[in-house]
Amino acid sequence: MNLDEKIISALKDLNYKEATEIQKKAIPIALKKRDILAAAQSGTGKTAAFLLPILTEILENKQSNIPILRALILVPTRELATQIAKAVDDFAKYLEVERLAVFGGVSTKEQEKKIAKGLDILVATSGRLMEHLKNGTVDLSSVTNVVIDEVDTMLDMGFLEDIEKILPNVGPKRQIMMFSATMNQNVKKLAKEFLTDPVVIEVALQRSAVKIIDQQIVLV
C-alpha cells in the first residue's frame, strides 16, 4: 500500500498480518486524497484505515521539528477519543508525531497549554472543540485531513450543528473522511453538504457487532 517503513515496523510490532476489508478499500483511496464516505462496523479496523494515510501524509510533509496541525478527528465520545489517541501512539511508534485528545469533563487549561506547544493530530469531541474555537485557543486553518468517526452516532446525539460550525474553520484544501456504522439518510445528507465527489465504501450493511467484540450488560 506504499506505506512508510517506519509505519510498517509499528504494524509488525502490533502483530498486524494483513489488511482488513475496510483497510484494503479505504487506504489506497485515502492516499490519493479523495473524500470518503464509508460504512464499517466497530471492530473492522477502520481506525487504521484513516490513521495510516494521515500518518503517511504527515511524514511526507514534515519540514521541521515544529508540529503543524494537519489532522482533525471528530468523535462522539471521550472514550473513543482516548482510544484513537492510543492508536496514534501505537501506529506512530517510530515517528515524531504530537497528538492530543480533547474532550469535556477535564480542565481546558491543560488542553490549551498542549495545543499551544504544537500538534500534528487533534482528536476531539465536538462540544469541547467548539469551546476551544470560541476561546480562540485552537486554529484549524492548517488542517488538511478531517475524519468524522461514527458519524451516525454523532448525528443521533445531536451534534449536527456543531459539525456544521466546526468544518468551515478548516482550510479549503482539505480531505474529509466520514466513517459510519450505518448509511442512513442523515449521514448521506451531511456527506452531500461537505464532501467533494466522495468515494462510497460499504463494508457493513447493518449495525451489528463483529464477533471479536465481547459485550456485557451491568445492572446498577
Image (tube, helix red, strand yellow):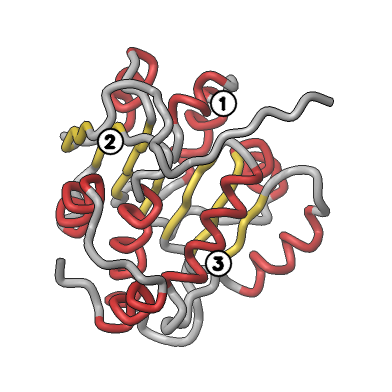
Secondary structure of the residue carrying tag 1 is: loop
Left or right placement of residue 133 versus residue 179 in this view: right
Residue picked out by circle 3: 99
Position of 65 relative to 114 (above/below) = below
Q: What residue appears at the point 50 percent right and 32 percent down from the top-left corner?
A: 163
Could one spot residue 144 in this view of the protein?
Answer: no
Report helix, strand or loop for mark 2: strand
- Determine contact: label 2, label 3, CB under 8 Å: no
Q: Within the image, what quadrant is residue 127 found in? A: top right
Q: Position of residue 215 (x, y in %)?
A: 57, 34
Give the structural element (helix, strand or loop) at label 3. strand
Report the quarter where the N terminus lies: bottom left
Q: Is residue 166 above or below residue 135?
A: above
Distance from disc 1 to disc 3, alpha carbons, whole Å, reads 23 Å
Using the image, tell me which numbered label, if any, was put on residue 159.
1
Q: Quadrant of residue 95?
A: bottom left
Q: Which residue is mark 2?
A: 38
Q: Residues within 10 Å of mark 2 (few under 14, many from 20)?
A: many
- Kindly identify the residue that appears in the image at 48 percent across and 29 percent down: 164
Q: Which residue occupies the foreground of this view, 185 or 170?
A: 185
Amino acid at pointer 1: Phe
- The answer to whether any part of residue 42 appears in the image is yes
Q: CA distance from mark 2 to mark 1?
A: 19 Å
- Give the quadrant of residue 183: top left
